[in-house]
Amino acid sequence: MKFLVVDDFSTMRRIVRGLLKEIGYNNCEEAEDGVEALSMLKGAKFDFVVSDINMPNMTGFQLLKAIKEDPNLKHLPVLMVTAEARKEDIVLAAQSGAAGYIVKPFTKATLEEKVLKIMQKLAAAA
């Protein structure tokens, strides 16, 4: 499994990457915004995207929309991460095709549970 962690805050990327490593996912790359992430996704094979929502240049929602509109990327699960637990964001994430949603700060257990749930859903759908 290859993960792409997208967040404009390098410390947050490092935290998410560290948590993924603790869960057992060692293959992670980072992007600092949606523009960089999209370029990386088009240039290499990834299996899972963990993206912040509030970022400069291209937000997590814009990235999610671009992923879901691309026939080569639309199968990718996208886990949205945000500091704000706004109901409309959660609804928009779900409507836009996000595989899940986590509010910062979160624990290793929360991340692991979400990732596993998403993997199970994908396996069931395959």
Image (cartoon, rainbow, N blue to C red):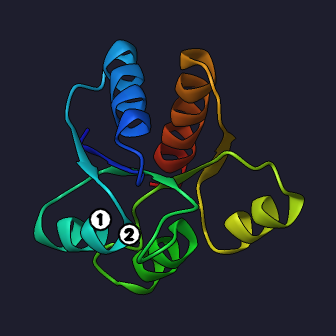
Residue, x 74% and y 71% (percent of image)?
A: 92
> What residue is disc 2 on?
34
Residue matched to label 1:
37
Query: How far from the left and from the top, in percent, is residue 77?
Result: 46, 56
Q: Residue at x 34, y 22 (%)?
A: 18
Q: Amino acid at mark 1?
A: Ala
Residue 59: percent from left, percent from top: 51, 71
User: Is the N terminus in the top left, top right, bottom left or bottom right quadrant?
Assistant: top left
Local crowd at mark 2 within 10 Å, few (<14), some, or many (≥20)? many
- Image marks 2 and 1: residues in contact by CB distance under 8 Å: yes
Q: CA distance from mark 2 to mark 1?
A: 5 Å
Quadrant in which the C terminus is drawn: bottom left
Q: Please tell me the numbered disc located at residue 21.
A: none
In this rendering, position of residue 61 left or right of residue 22: right
Residue at 60 percent across and 61 percent down: it is 98
**Along the horizontal axis of the image, is 24 left or right of 102?**
left
Q: Residue lying at the far left in this picture: please name it.
A: 43
